[in-house]
Image (cartoon, rainbow, N blue to C red):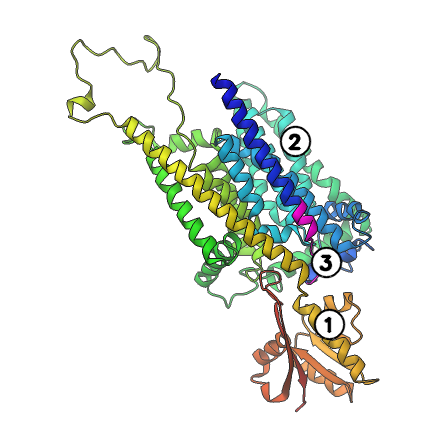
Amino acid sequence: MLKRIMRLRKAAAALAAALFALLWTVYSLMHVSPYAASWDEVDFVLALDRFDLLAMQPHFPGYPYFVLGGMAMRRFAGDNPVLAYGILNTFLAALSAWPVWRLARRMLSPAWACTVVMLVLSAPYVWLQDAGPMSEGAGIALLWWFLWSWQSAMERRDWRTSLAALFVFGLLMGVRLSYAPFGLALVWLLGVIWAGWRAAGRKALPRALLFTAAGAGCQLLWLGGLALSEGGLAGFAKLAEAFTAGHFSEWGGGVAADPSLPFGERLLRFAGGNVLWTGMFARSAALMAASAALLLAALLCAGARRPPGGAGRPRLARRAAAWLRRPAPPGALAALAGAYGAWALLAQNIDKPRHITPLIGVMWLLLAAMFRAPAPASRPAAPGEAGAALPPAAGAVPPACAAGQAPQAPRAARIRRALRGAGGLLAACVIALQAGRGASLVSRQAAERPAVYQLADALREMAQQNGGRRIVVYTWEEDRVLDYLRTPVEARQILTYDYFRANTKADGDALILLTDHVLGGFEAQAGPLRDHVKPIRTFRSDPLFEPVYADITLYEWKGG
């Protein structure tokens, strides 16, 4: 009877998770973003018409699996490339509910595993990425499949599960190369399997070489095709070198690219601004308060579960070595998330919070894992086995009773149950707040025109009002979107003030416009220039949708 009740509870929890994923999918498909409002988004959209890395369609390394998926979905999107990517991201995100469920079930009860699925899917900031034409949504979905396949391989340690993990990681790299730090999991897996081979007396080196070759082959499936598309390996290598050098020295936004930002300030912006305020809480004070309460309950529950005392425990080095050979899921996921977090902090653009999105779901899973029930007590050793305790002498008093202490196990169990119950209610509150906030943001993202689109509309109006007069607008990254929207003015991307002055002299009677990003860059080179410009109009959109170009001011250059 008890087993039947447990099966019914598991089935009910799984059904609730599936129903939530279905409702989430339907709502998301109804509110897929129709806008490509950033340089990278335009890159992906143009790639569906002509795949060309030299023309940045898309930018290096090409993300071929994501582009192929967009091509497959285009027929279901009315030949709209932007919607095709949004539909692809939505479907992949919905399918990732399965590996999230399986990972959570390794640590938690069915009810809590269902809670994790809901927490992960309803996370508002990740939801925004799922509804747009960037590869973050597809990458996060494949990341969950990879983490699940890797955890299965760590547990079973056979060739079938190991090859599955290698193959899924190849798919992940062909969708989102910046998630490469999670590949440390495969190095970890090889080390664990190597130790098993050595312990079993097998030759480890040939097997390790075969493992490495299989992993390289999974990556060559997409790298080889890209090399052929660029005319060969030499051309692809030059393109890779140029892109990598630029990413880490000029425009990538990493530590080396922006030495003027103190590391302490960068760390605060990353952890407090990007990961927590934007990523976890979607800039909602109510969601932040509910999440803080849930975290407090989780910490209390984890503390109540920890056994008192530490006598007889093995040394730290021995425990660490044993954990590395057979890691528990929470700690293993935390280690991998920490590796990616360090990469995102040091090598990714601090101005674009979307780079932290892989951490959000893992953090929710780790927080929920604090509510897991304590592991069942191990079977007592039989007399004569190693570690078996001698029976107490007749009339001996147990140490706790001898010290005048009452058994605490029932009270501790009641406290844990109460904390898990409170945690469940708080988690339901967080899910409700996330779902409300996320649904509102996704619908607004689909309905409100981005600031750069508003700029394009204004430039069209100016072109009509000025008759045949030539208009030149100087921008930074906005010119990619303006060109994609076929704005009837000449848009020029420019970085240096001296070159701008030479151009304006050569343009004669043309109407010269520039954006605030360009003006700010010029003032950093030549000092204050506000007396030489006249503000025309400011365009605003929600910075959660496009943080860098959510606020654009257009100026007219008066000369001088």
Q: Amino acid at mark 3?
A: Pro
The x and y percentages for residue 362 are 52, 43
Q: Amino acid at mark 2?
A: Ala
Residue drawn at point x = 26 percent, y = 11 percent: 390
Q: Is residue 400 left or right of residue 159?
A: left
For the question of whether residue 189 can be seen, the reply is no
Mark 3 or 2 closer to N-term? Answer: 3
Q: Amino acid at mark 1?
A: Ala
Residue drawn at point x = 59 percent, y = 32 percent: 15
**Considering only vertical position in the picture, is 172 above or below 246?**
above
The x and y percentages for residue 202 are 57, 20
* Label 3 CA crowd tier, 10 Å (few <14, some 14–19, many 20+): many
Residue 164, disc: 2
Q: For residue 351, which quarter of the picture?
A: bottom right
- Give the residues in magenta: 26-37
The x and y percentages for residue 554 are 66, 78
Residue identified by numbered label 3: 34
Residue identified by numbered label 1: 456
**Considering only vertical position in the picture, is 374 above or below 554?**
above
The x and y percentages for residue 368 are 46, 39
440 or 375, nearer to the observer: 440
- In the picture, the quarter occupied by the C terminus is bottom right
Query: Which element carries disc 3, helix, strand or loop?
Result: loop
Disc 3/disc 1 C-alpha distance (Å): 16 Å
541 or 153, nearer to the observer: 541
Query: Which element carries disc 2, helix, strand or loop?
Result: helix
Q: For residue 535, which quarter of the picture?
A: bottom right
Q: Are marks 3 and 2 in contact (CB under 8 Å)?
A: no
